[in-house]
Image (cartoon, rainbow, N blue to C red):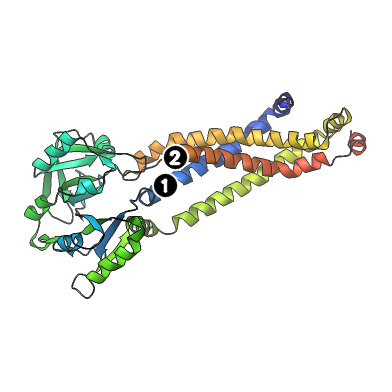
């Protein structure tokens, strides 16, 4: 700390160069933050998946249905605590671009299966009592201005016609990654108004098991139970099911890691070059410092501290900009949750400081090895 004034003095020496270097870190960390929130948006279902929940779909494809009769059979299987089901609706609100996920749900069991979705008891009771009632996520309600009591039309794409619903409940997620974009309504409403082919079938089942450690065994048992039937099943943990959806978009994780790696390698080269120039410009001053008693290690730490402090400033600015931009991404790309956690903010700043230290390592070593006589001869 006693050399802090020297660090500030050296940083102020070339204000434009220092500002540009800090700006480079800020841009790099802003991009880092955006990549992190995009990764979170694609894999949010994986991050918040329940460890004790399994998803049962048709073995052929998720778009193929399963019989309603499977609910009773699943509930009687060993280790199964609860069973619920849902069906994809696939409609739009007013215009084609106004899309959000809509599910026809089993109102008797769905809320208990997903306790992370918080709904006031009075709102839930009102929703259950209204055959045309709907429960909507807080993000979708805010986006379209839905309020309790509103009657809204949804134009069906899979199920033709205009379907009208009464907003009876608004749910919120307990965690930042919980999906608040969904729209739920009664499966019985779909069964009554829908085409004949929807009768007696559902889209998928969600099963809660007593022991999460038995997930693999339970999944195998379910699939064996319905093997060689007209509707064979494919059962995965909720985490694996969510990950399979993310993988359909391609290897997003590899793309993000590649872009991030290129950005930070470029930043390493730029910062290293900047610090090398700064050390060369101050050869005489460094020699004077050694002459008056500064040790080689003190000079090394002084240069490293300058590089790390530049990185710290740029890192803080960059991650804060990314944190502020995340909500804007959510508005531009509705239906996805963009979030930068405090841990990710700290990790970004720490990564910036690490890059700063690495970038300053070679110039710092050069300054440490500088011989006083040789340095003064150059002045």
Residue farthest toward the bottom in the current orientation of the protein: 228
User: Where is residue 262 shown, x and y percent of the image?
Assistant: 58, 51
Give the vertical position of 87 relative to 94 (above or below). Answer: below
Which residue occupies 85% across, 40% down? 370
Q: CA distance from mark 1 to mark 2?
A: 8 Å
User: Where is residue 314 shown, x and y percent of the image?
Assistant: 59, 34
In the rendered image, which quarter contains the N terminus? Answer: top right
Left or right relative to 253: residue 79 = left
Crowding at dot 1, Cα within 10 Å, few <14 / some 14-19 / many 20+, comes out as many
Secondary structure beneath label 1: helix
**Label 1 with label 2: CB-CB less than 8 Å:** yes
Residue 11's disc number: none
In the rendered image, which quarter contains the C terminus? Answer: top right
Which residue is disc 2 drawn over? Answer: 340
Which residue is disc 1 drawn over? Answer: 40
User: Where is residue 68 shown, x and y percent of the image?
Assistant: 14, 61
In the image shown, does 181 or 20 lie closer to the viewer? Answer: 181
């Amino acid at each position: 700390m006693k050399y802090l004034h020297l660090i500030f003095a050296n940083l102020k020496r070339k204000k434009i160069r220092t500002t540009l270097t800090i700006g480079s870190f800020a841009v790099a960390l802003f991009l880092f933050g955006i990549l992190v929130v995009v990764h979170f948006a694609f894999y949010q279902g994986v991050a918040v998946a329940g460890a004790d929940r399994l998803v049962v779909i048709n073995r052929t494809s998720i778009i193929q249905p399963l019989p309603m009769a499977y609910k009773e059979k699943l509930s009687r299987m060993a280790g199964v605590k609860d069973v619920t089901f849902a069906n994809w609706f696939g409609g739009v609100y007013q215009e084609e671009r106004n899309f959000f996920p809509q599910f026809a749900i089993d109102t008797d069991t769905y809320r208990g299966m997903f306790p992370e979705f918080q709904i006031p008891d009075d709102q839930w009771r009102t929703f259950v009592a209204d055959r045309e009632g709907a429960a909507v996520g807080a993000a979708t309600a805010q986006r379209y201005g839905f309020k309790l009591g509103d009657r809204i039309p949804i134009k069906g794409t899979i199920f033709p016609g205009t379907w009208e619903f009464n907003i009876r409940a608004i749910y919120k997620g307990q965690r930042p990654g919980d999906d608040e974009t969904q729209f739920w309504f009664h499966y019985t409403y779909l069964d009554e108004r829908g085409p004949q082919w929807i009768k007696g079938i559902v889209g998928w089942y969600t099963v809660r098991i007593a022991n999460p450690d038995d997930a693999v065994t339970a999944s195998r048992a379910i699939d064996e139970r319905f093997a060689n039937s007209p509707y064979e099943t494919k059962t995965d943990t909720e985490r694996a099911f969510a990950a399979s959806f993310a993988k359909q978009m391609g290897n997003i994780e590899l793309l993000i890691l590649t872009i991030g790696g290129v950005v930070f390698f470029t930043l390493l080269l730029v910062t290293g070059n900047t610090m090398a120039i700064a050390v060369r410009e101050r050869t005489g001053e460094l020699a004077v410092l050694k002459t008056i008693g500064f040790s080689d290690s003190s000079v090394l730490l002084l240069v490293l501290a300058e590089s790390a402090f530049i990185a710290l400033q740029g890192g803080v600015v960059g991650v804060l900009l990314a944190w502020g931009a995340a909500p804007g991404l959510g508005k531009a790309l509705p239906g996805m949750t963009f979030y930068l956690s405090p841990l990710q903010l700290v990790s970004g700043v720490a990564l910036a400081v690490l890059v700063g230290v690495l970038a300053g390592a070679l110039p710092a070593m050069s300054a440490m090895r500088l011989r006083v006589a040789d340095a003064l001869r150059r002045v």
